[in-house]
Image (cartoon, helix red, strand yellow):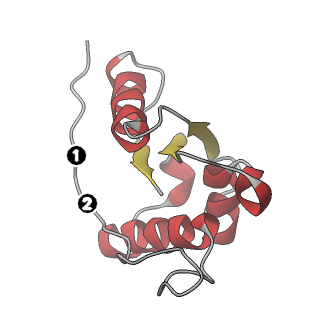
């Protein structure tokens, strides 16, 4: 079995999404796009080498109802061949997404993945 390694970590801005919160006007897709761009730019990654982006989101409703990782992949300018999958495991969504991304590498199903949450 192949080992999986974490090479970088990126944190989204913190704030509240309520009407008076600092993140009220920012969608999860926008946050995920910023994260993917930062990972790409900080590590000089050829996005065609990324097999999958696995992201968790606890309540993908309304505008968030799209497949957030796939939309963020396209918005961030990644290769169109890069897949994106959404995970909903309530409060553990991001951790589960990271575990699934690592499991794909360990099982030999992917060479490079990105896992996280918004």
In the picture, the quarter occupied by the N terminus is: top left
Question: x, y (%) of residue 69?
Answer: 61, 51
Marker disc for residue 6 = 1
- Rendered residue at 63%/71% (across/down): 27
Q: From the viewer's perspective, is the residue at label 1 or at label 2 nearer? A: 2
Image position of 18 with respect to 99: above or below: below
Marker disc for residue 112 = none
Q: Are marks 1 and 2 in contact (CB under 8 Å)?
A: yes
- Rendered residue at 46%/29% (across/down): 110
Q: Is residue 98 left or right of residue 27?
A: left
**Residue 26 appears in view:** yes
Image position of 7 with respect to 10: above or below: above
Q: Quadrant of residue 103?
A: top left
Q: Is residue 29 left or right of residue 55?
A: right
The local secondary structure at tag 1 comes to: loop
Question: x, y (%) of residue 60?
Answer: 66, 49
Query: Circle 2 sits on which residue?
Result: 9
Q: Is residue 59 left or right of residue 15?
A: right
Q: Is residue 43 left or right of residue 100?
A: left
Question: x, y (%) of residue 81?
Answer: 69, 47
Residues under labels 1 and 2: Cα distance?
8 Å
**Residue 77 appears in view:** no
- Rendered residue at 22%/52% (across/down): 7
């Amino acid at each position: 079995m192949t080992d999986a390694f974490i090479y970088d970590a990126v944190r989204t801005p913190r704030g509240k999404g309520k009407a008076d919160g600092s993140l009220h006007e920012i969608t999860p897709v926008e946050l995920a796009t910023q994260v993917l761009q930062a990972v790409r730019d900080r590590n000089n990654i050829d996005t065609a080498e990324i097999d999958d982006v696995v992201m968790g989101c606890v309540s993908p409703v309304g505008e968030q109802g799209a497949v957030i990782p796939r939309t963020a992949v396209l918005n961030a300018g990644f290769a169109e061949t890069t897949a994106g999958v959404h995970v909903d495991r309530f409060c553990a969504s991001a951790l589960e997404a990271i575990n699934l991304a690592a499991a794909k590498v360990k099982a030999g199903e992917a060479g490079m993945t990105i896992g996280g949450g918004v």
